[in-house]
Each structure stands twice: as structure tokens, then as C-alpha cells.
Amino acid sequence: MTDDVLVVHGGTPLEGRIRVRGAKNLVSKAMVAALLGDTPSRLFDVPKIRDVEVVRGLLGLHGVKVTDGEEEGELVFDPANVESASTDQINVHAGSSRIPILFCGPLLHRLGHAFIPDLGGCHIGPRPIDFHLQALREFGATVDKRPEGLHLSAPNGLRGTKFSLPYPSVGATEQVLLTAVMAEGVTELRNAAVEPEILDLICVLQKMGAIIKVHTDRVIEIQGVPKLHGYTHRPIPDRIEAASWAAAALATRGHVEVLGAQQADMMTFLNIFRSVGGEYEVTDLRPPRNGRPGQEGGIRFWHPGGELKSVALETDVHPGFMTDWQQPLVVALTQARGLSIVHETVYEQRLGYTEALNSMGANIQVYRDCLGGTPCRFGRRNFKHSAVIAGPSKLHAADLVIPDLRAGFSHLIAALAAEGTSRVYGVDLINRGYEDFEAKLADLGAHAERP
């Protein structure tokens, strides 16, 4: 693990400007959607992250030609020769990502069968695929569970259905969308996720020729069509990465401008950020005019000085406070005066990272009780899913081992905010969702290097 460690010299405020590209939680799904078209697709602003490489590899195994476009961050997908891939080839990607489950619908439409290997992703709770498989069976798919993975077939084709999710799962909503667009008849999905990345995926599919209506009360109606064509799309920026850098600015008492960040998709985060005592300014896009250069829009985040204030927050599905926002922000909350309360209602095992923060001097207690009023699935199931953070706490350096993507970035923020030199192990996991994060750290004046 010696080559997978970052030595971080903490105590220096992050200062400067970085840029975020397309949202990780949209880009990989838009890549899968290219399988459904009968003409090439073009996707812009694609970040260089590991999840993108995994999906690119899987598309290539299934005959989709993926090439770099003329513009930096542009990918072109040609699905003219979609074919079956061998189980052994696909299993090379087993455990590397959860994206392969979303290949089911498109492959069933294109080939009549699909194989899905063991899934990976971050260990933040069981994250079962039961919702996915139940939905696929409702469409008429046959699912055969074998030791090497899942074999699916659709001997009679796929048909539209009425389906209600027990929980507004993002992944299951994406599964239904990618399957329903070419299923015969009409599909009605109730209790759907409506995150900005979901709506952007709907935009991609609509560009391809899909007919999708988003109703009120989390109801999405999809009218199946016999064929789809390619798309050209520039995705929404990554609101998770933008918030992560904002939290880093706050925790290190710095000033970071995140180019590409959009206010509309971050409203809930921005409200909490300001309540804690952080400041931000939205800088709008300014096109070139009268010979003057243009300016890319974004959001500037900074610590205004003085003490931060404690808050109570609960994670929830959109438009609530995003679960991926809480881990980076909790590091900043260790510097706030008073007791902050975090009630995690999306993933039951997402507070394990707080042990590492406590080893650095933080004072965080986790509880099985629901410390908040948001309806929660975990309250009586013995999961420690609420946290009380007492601050301010002086953080000191430590050796840290990254357990998952978002916790990993939180550990990195803590090391940057702490006094002394920390060693962060397993740091390559951060590459799953944060493009060129080491170069961005350097641009912001951080003192960090590989040993």
C-alpha cells in the first residue's frame, strides 16, 4: 500500500480556483444510455475518473466503439456493432463498480440477454439490488442467479408496467428509465427519485427520442418507443465535488472558487453552509463581449473568520440535504462551537468514518436513535446512523485508512485542517469520483505529496 498513500502537511488554508466537470452520477449513466441508440452519441465534459474507465471498458466489451472527441473531456460512442461479451471478460470488472447493473435493460433490448457480474462500490450499507431485479421482472425479464453473477433474458420481449418503489432509490429509478424507454406500452413509476442527475438522464433519453413525462408527487410516465437514436449532451456539473471543495475551504479557513458549480442544484447545501457561518458568492457566466474575455460561472466559498456555528441537519432524498454532502461537511462541523446533530436517513452505515476523526481529536458520538424528525428506515434496526459533534475541536495529524469514496475525501479534508503531517492510505479510491484531485490540491496551495 506504500504507493497508495498521500502525505499531507496540514494547517494551511486552501486558496485558489478549481473546476468541476460533469456529474459522476450522471456521466456513467449517460454512457450506458448510448447502448440504446442506433446512431453515435457524444458526451462532453466527461471527468477522468475511475468509474468512467470501468463503464468505458464494459461498453467496449459489448462492441460499442468509444473514442475521444475533439474537445477535451469529449467521448463519442458508436453502438453499431453491439454484441455479447464473455462471462470471463465481464468478470474482470467484478467488484469495481455498481454501474453494470444498469446495463440490464439496454442489453435486453439490444441482445435479448445480459450478464451482470458481482457488483462493487462503496461499503456504506448493504445497498441491495432487489429493487432493480424486481423492476426487471415486472418488465418481463427472467433473472437467473448463478455463482458467477446474474444471467437475464427476455424471451418475450419487455413490456411496460406499473411499478412503485418502496423507497425513492436513485439506482432503481435509473434502471426503470433505461428499461422502459424501449419497452412495449406505457410504464408508470411511482415514488421515483427526482435528483437533478435523474432529470438530466431524462433529458439525455428525450434527446434520443424517448417520451417521458415527469408528474408531481414523484410519478414518472414513460411511453415506450421502438427505436432510439444517439444524443449530444453536456451534463450538469458535479454538485457533490463542488460541495466537497466548499467544505474543505470552510474546514481549513480558506477561500476556494469552484468554477462550473451551479446554484440551483446546490440550494439545500448552500443554506446549511451559510447557517454554519460560511460565506459564498455565485459568479454567473459572462460571455465574451466587446473584445473582453468571457468568464466561466461558478461559486466562491470561504471562511469569513470568527467562529463557526453548530447546526442540526438530516440527510434525505432530493430536494433534501444530500447524503454525499454530509461526510465532508462534518469535518467543518468539528470546528463549530456547540453541538451539531447529523441524522443520516439514506445509508445506514455511513458514519463509520467518524472514528478516524475522533482519533484526530474530534468529539463525535454516534447513536442508534433517530436524532431528527425525518422519517427513517433505520430507527429500530440497530444501526448507528445519528451523530452528535461537539466543537470546536483542535485536530491533530494521524495515519488514516480510507474506507469509501466520500469518507475518503473527508479524511483528506481532516488531514488538511489538522496540525502536523498525516499519512492518508488508500487514497487512490478518491479517483473514483474526484478528477485530478491531487493536481487541484496543488492549485489550492495544499502541501501534499506521494512518498
Image (cartoon, rainbow, N blue to C red):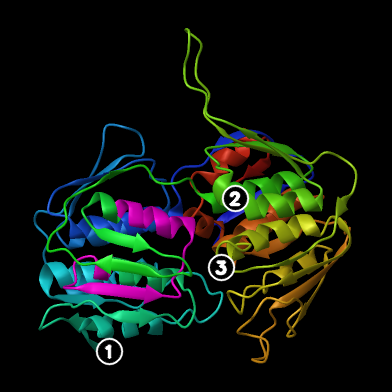
Numbered range of the magenta stretch: 178-204
Q: Residue 46's x, y, as percent?
A: 38, 45
Label 1, label 3: how far apart the Cα atoms are = 30 Å
x 88%, y 61%: residue: 391
Residue at numbered disc 1: 145
Q: Are marks 1 and 2 in contact (CB under 8 Å)?
A: no
Choose mark 1 or mark 3, whichever is in front: 3
Residue sitting at the far top:
291
According to the image, label 2 marks what residue? 266
Could you say which is closer to the camera, residue 32 or residue 189? 189
Tell me which residue sits at (79%, 52%) in the image: 275
Residue 443 in view of the camera: yes
Say which element carries label 2.
Answer: helix
Left or right: residue 139 compared with residue 348:
left
Q: Nearer the viewer, residue 388 or 248?
A: 388
- The reply, left or right, for residue 329 in relation to residue 394 is left
Nearer the observer, 157 or 247: 157
Label 3: which secondary element: loop
Q: Which amino acid type corresponds to the residue marked 3 in the rendered image?
A: Val
Place of residue 360 in the rendered image (x, y in percent of width and height, measured from the top left): 80, 62
Mark 3 / mark 2, whichever is N-terminal = 2
Residue 149 rendering spot, x and y as whole percentages: 28, 82
Residue 196's spot in the image, x, y percent? Answer: 47, 55
- Mark toward the start of the polypeptide (1 vs 3): 1
Q: Earlier in the sequence, mark 1 or mark 2?
A: 1
Classify mark 1: helix, strand or loop: strand
| Mark 2 surroundings within 10 Å by alpha-carbon count, few (fewer than 14), some (14 through 19), many (20 or more) | some
